[in-house]
Amino acid sequence: MQLLPSVVAVVRDGECLALIQMTLEAQGIEVLAARDAQEGWDLIQRSHADAILVEAELENGTGLLRRIADWDPGAQVLLLTEHYTEEAAVDGVQHGACDCLGKPLSPETLARRVGEILDEARLRHETLELDERLLETFRFHGMAGRSPKMLETFARIKRVAPHYRIAMISGATGTGKELVAHALHDLSPVSARRFAVCNCSAIVETLFESELFGHVRGAFTGATQDRAGLFEYAQGGTVFLDEIADMPLTTQSKLLRVVQNQELQRVGSPEVRKIDVRVVAATNRDMRALVAKNLFREDLFYRLTMVELKLPPLAERKEDLPLLQRHFVEKFARSYGKRIDGISRRAQGVLSGHGWPGNVRELENVLGHACMLAETEFIDVRDLPDYLHRAMRGAVGSEPDLMPLAELEGRYTQHVLERVGGNKLHAAKVLGISRATLYRILRDGGNAAGGPLVDLLGRMPAGARLRIQ
């Protein structure tokens, strides 16, 4: 059985409330009524209605609008007022309302406007369901991406995984090299066997050979018993050598024998042991430059790069940013046991303006931090690390001629408004947009222009937010 669409009406005027109930219930819409701000707030939280009507003359009505916008930035709030003016409408929009209607209400106008809001809510719900399915489509073994570069990477992993014996993954720090290594292993015929990891930058040089190849009792001081190395531990499976550029040259020569002949000798033992392992190496450095400087063995380099996968930095796949945001928000919301529906528009503006030198790992850390701090169902600017705010201020301050498109739109709209003496209807005609769109730009951009983007974002109403799409 399909549930009726519902509307919460927080209206103290009994005659107006009766008109709302009669008009909307005749359209098959359930009306839940409250007579004061506190009762309305309790009802809104309990009901999760599709739309909300709030009387502007209500005591603490502005405070109610702000609470609603902080609690659910996607809420559709229609403001009802006895003193309708364009300025009152803009003020209501800036406090989180989506539109403003003057009283006495026209039943036809009320039914039409609420119907439009409910249609928008239904479309948004359907869009979110499609987004969830889209995200599932573009998830790949713990990674997410729909940019051409990442789709090609995913396709290469699928093609290579069943056949490779040795592979090299290159990419900047934080691009997800270990995830790719796991994907290669998981899609290979040895996925049921061990996946052993060695971080080459974390091993003391004198212990390298023992860690990788093992040792026998008495091989060196402290070797009190025989010990298998990483390659023997991973027998039949995969060894992942992360940051392989940090491996000493002496160890590189022994590694070459292992990958070429699939055999090794424990430190202090003449016995040759046969092994059967796949090797995946990873680096964030320019290996060809290291080879040219004789800091890495050329023969080992060519052996390891029989199959090479290069991961692009996040700055080269910015189209993946919304998808990755949704991916990590869902991940951390589950991890923390919190309901987080998305990211506010102003927070998205800060995230999209950042250069992401730490790549996907940095984005993951930022959103993990934000999800932990978020007090509402949407991540807002206040939940983001401070360094993102400072970086955005510095970028805009140092490049005064460069600014985000949304800010440019807001500034030009303000310019037109000033030129037409503040007449919003005239300004909308000059700009070639509807008055509702003009209100949206004013709401999203704030009324003060000329400052850095983050300052503008900080003055935007809490209701100016979007669900992740």
Image (tube, rainbow, N blue to C red):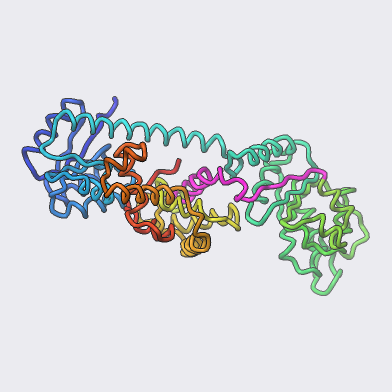
Image coordinates for residue 140, horizontal then vertical, percent: 60, 40
Is residue 326 part of the magenta span, yes or no? yes
Residue sitting at x 89%, y 65%: 268
Q: Overall secondary structure of the magenta stretch?
A: helix
| Image quarter in which the N terminus is found | top left
For residue 284, side relative to residue 109 (left or right) = right
Residue occupying image coordinates x 61% and y 42%: 141
Please determine whether, in this image, residue 212 is positioned above or below residue 29. below
Is 24 on the left-hand or right-hand side of 142?
Answer: left
From where the camera sits, is residue 373 visible? no
Residue 88 percent across, percent down from the top left: 20, 48
Q: Which residue reaches farthest bottom?
A: 221
Which of these two is toward me, 218 or 197?
A: 197
On the image, the x and y values in percent for residue 334 come to 45, 48
Left or right, 256 with reference to 351: right
The C terminus sits in image quarter = top left
Q: Give x and y (percent) for residue 90.
A: 25, 47
**Which residue is at a point 18% across and 39% down the rendered structure image?**
101
Res 37 visible: yes
Q: In this view, does 463 lie to the left or right of 21?
A: right
Q: Quadrant of residue 183?
A: top right
Q: Quadrant of residue 116?
A: top left
Outermost residue, left side: 15
Assess whether residue 282 is covered by the magenta stretch. no
Q: Which of 340 and 56 is in front in this view?
A: 56
State the extent of the magenta-drawn residues as a range.
Answer: 306-333
